[in-house]
Image (spheres, helix red, strand yellow):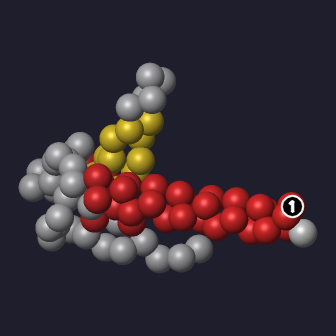
Amino acid sequence: MPGKRGGSVECYARRVRAEDQEKHERNRVGLCLDCAYARRVQTERGSIFYLCELAAVNPEFRKYPALPVLICSGYAKKTGG
């Protein structure tokens, strides 16, 4: 049975790490993480930015806002699907 227990501990550890990563990303990015108007952009070197698509039609919004975005008048939560 040791193999079985080790497997369950490993699965738990993976789940905790995934939750920690998600929480870290939420703290780093803020509202852009799940905004309908934000698009995640990754460079060839691995840098990650969030592009605000509202900036194309409204000059009040920055194309690449400083993160984390904690308050935004244009924020709209992504819908599932």
Q: Residues within 10 Å of mark 1 (few under 14, many from 20)?
A: few
Question: In the depicted view, which residue is nearer to us: 4 or 26?
Answer: 4
Question: In the depicted view, which residue is nearer to us: 72 or 14?
Answer: 14
Q: Is residue 11 left or right of residue 46?
A: right
Q: Is residue 1 left or right of residue 45?
A: right
Q: Is residue 41 above or below residue 76?
A: above
Residue 55 showing in the rendered view: no
**Helix, strand or loop at mark 1:** helix
Name the spot of residue 53 as percent of width and height, x first: 31, 53
Name the spot of residue 62 as percent of width and height, x first: 16, 48
| Rendered-image quadrant of the C terminus | bottom right
Q: Is residue 51 left or right of residue 5?
A: left
Residue at point 33% right, 41% down?
A: 49
| Rendered-image quadrant of the N terminus | bottom right
Q: Is residue 80 above or below residue 70?
A: below
Residue at the left extreme of this rendering: 60
Total label count? Answer: 1
Determine the image quadrant of residue 31. bottom left
Residue at point 32% right, 46% down?
A: 51
Q: Is residue 73 above or below residue 20?
A: below
Question: In the depicted view, which residue is nearer to us: 61 or 58?
Answer: 61
Identity, as a three-letter code, of the amino acid under mark 1:
Gly
Residue at the right extreme of this rendering: 1
Residue 65 showing in the rendered view: yes
Q: Is residue 62 left or right of residue 37?
A: left
Name the spot of residue 8 as percent of width and height, x first: 75, 68
Determine the image quadrant of residue 25. bottom left
Residue at point 45% right, 60% down?
A: 20
Residue topped by disc 1: 3
